Image: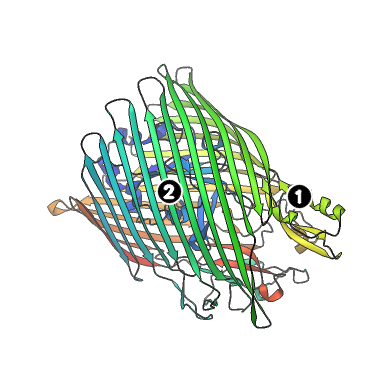
Amino acid sequence: MLVSLGAEDLFDLSFEELLEVKITSRRFEESYVEVPRSISVVTEADLREGSFQDLPEAVGQLPNVSVRESFGRWRSKLVSRGIGNIAGENVVVLLVDGLPMSSFGESVSLHDVERIEVLRGSDVALYGRGAFAGAINIITKRPGEGAGGRVSVGLDDEGGYDASLVHDFEFGAEFDLMFTARSYEKEAEYENTLGTGDSEVGGEASDEFALSGSWQANGPLTLNFRSLYQDVDDGPLPAYLQSSAFNNCFLDSRPQYYCGVLATPSEIGLNLDREYLEPGFQREVGMHHLALKWDSGGPEVEFKAGLQDQDYEVGFDGDFYELEAAYTSRTGSLDELSLELVANWELGLSDRLLLGVAEYSRESVFRQDQTLIVFGSPVFSEGELSGSEVTNTAVFASYDFQLGDAGFVTADLRYARDEIEYIRGEESGSESWYAWTPSLSYRRDWGSNGLLYGALSQAKKPGGFNAELRTLNYLDEAAREEAMVFFTFDEEKVTTLEFGARNEAWNETLWWDLSVYASEWDDLQFSQSLSYQDGEGRTRRAGTIANGGRAELYGFELEGRLALTDQLEASLGVGYSYSKLDDTYTTAQEDLTGDGSVSGNRVPNAPEFDGTFALTYRTELDAGLELFVRPAFIYEGERFVAEHNLAVLEDLERFDLTVGLSGEDWTLSVWGKNLNQDNALESANRFGDAATFFVRRAFGLDLPDKRRIGASFSWRY
């Protein structure tokens, strides 16, 4: 494992101090060297000196972690170690200060982030229902650095800007406040040359502010809080359809298909000027956190509470190309509450016991309206109110004890009840799932600064409902009962065995971290078509999610840094993730080939290789100035869009460069993103072509960011 430190931190800290960087991935503070897991940390210096502007960019550089936007900042696709969200809920949990906060990562700001801890592999035992394949924990800055702050302003060559403020207020020795604000705008990158209405597509804009406080009494009690408000106002979604006219294989089948590499189109066309459409994505977010810690010399007890509320609206050309066929508007809301109480005992010199209880609830509802063009006239169809309410209640424990002179064993266990209530129009219902999720690890000191470890863990991803089946019109009760067998789908399960080693070498000039793993992924959730007889005896189809097979995965992560000279450092991160579906069947494959088996194919949307190589050069100049140069090459291998393994997203190869000059209290940097103008698509989804009444396959293409060059200035006061 590598904790990638910014050059300023790297050259200011000794090697011993570097090894003492503290993280909280196991719910207590410890050196990252001691963690028996594959984990990476992106520091505040990394964010600044890499000129990262969003979470996908900052985290996507790490090995075996992929974060891609889908339909702009509306959605995202997260993959960890080859496991992605094929259907159902996300497999990587996003946490803010240790509490789950879903549907926020696409627009999260980094200007007031202290660090980002990224855990690969399942850790449901400690992090709960969402950490099926990994966890991304965003740790925000806390007040307490004394009165003062930082102002930053950035501009790019397309007219975009990024301005932020972080200011600390000091009220005596016990109480501190911090106010942060950010205003961000990225100009649209694609001309809508084939469509109507807005001439540009893909612009982004958001404003936010946050207030956080820290109170430390003379006694054992510490209080921290943070409240944030964010307003997102993005332009038309940067997506376009590759229509069924491009299909080149299985042309005799009903859906047809495209086999080969999907390419970014040279021109796009969306109809965006209709009076019944407000194109773009808007979201208002309120997020509030409270943490109380009691440490009187006995057990350390911490209570955390997190509340998030969202309201959003998205409108888009429903056929996603210049065809005049459909327009879609979707409005929704999300309310989320996380409560957690944890007690942590240090038992003697080396043993530790952690006990906790947690409750997480989420209510998400939406309505999707459509306007269809029938014989040249618009026909409005109001959607039903749909959604779900999740309540997850859990108890968990972790026991860490010494075994022998230099060995330590950690046993984690979580028991959870997951109750999910669905809403579909006037229909509603609920179901509960119960799960034990254990984890066992052994670590052993290797020299003075190294570690050897092994870990075995199991995780479960929540099941759910196909609520639409309750609302369909069936021929008779027998047809209804036959369909209702598929009303619920079961949990997925993954079991992972991992071994790792990390150490220094060559007189403390090299630090390296290697993790190897093997996973068995069972009861995969796939989108499946269900045939049924409607009230008039006709055969119809309904889209469902059903458990359809299993997968085998194995791979490794290798990270390292090497001090080539006193001024030059090289860093490398490489990930390999092999995945193979086994005993897996999907109706989409059967419709296409006549045989539903996809066994032997790779898991969709999961790259097999990825890597990052960067050089960091820093030198002192006259007049107390420092020069900083950081070139970086980022690679992510090709991926398949779906389980057929026929349509391919080409590999990403991107070159970034940052050059900075800093004085005592200011920094000026010039940066370039995607300087080689790589044109690989951001992501893609199977879609239906409206020109064929959504029968033939087409592909919704998420357009990539183009080359951008800019400059940023930061002043500390």
The amino acid beneath tag 1 is Phe
Would you say 109 lies left or right of 381 here? Answer: left
For badge 2, the amino acid type reads Met
- Which quarter of the image is occupied by the N terminus? top left
Q: Residue furthest front?
A: 426
Tag 2 secondary structure: strand
The mark tally for this picture is: 2
Q: Residue 673: x and y, percent? A: 39, 62
Query: Which residue is drawn at the image coordinates 55% and 50% (left, top)?
Result: 79
Could you say whether the residue bearing mark 1 is in a helix, strand or loop?
loop
Residue 285: name its quadrant: bottom left
Report the disc number at residue 287.
2
- Compared to residue 501, the image places residue 654 above or below, namely below
For residue 177, side relative to residue 81 (left or right): left
Residue at image point 50% right, 35% down: 500
Please state which of residues 434 and 557 is positioned toward the viewer in this rendering.
434
The part of the image, by quadrant, that contains residue 454 is top right
Q: Is residue 605 left or right of residue 208?
A: right
Mark 2 or 1: in front is: 2
For residue 171, above or below residue 363: above
Q: Nearer the viewer, residue 697 or 16?
A: 697
Residue 301 visible in the picture: yes
Residue 486, label in figure: 1
Indicate the position of residue 165 as horizontal and vertical percent values. 28, 54
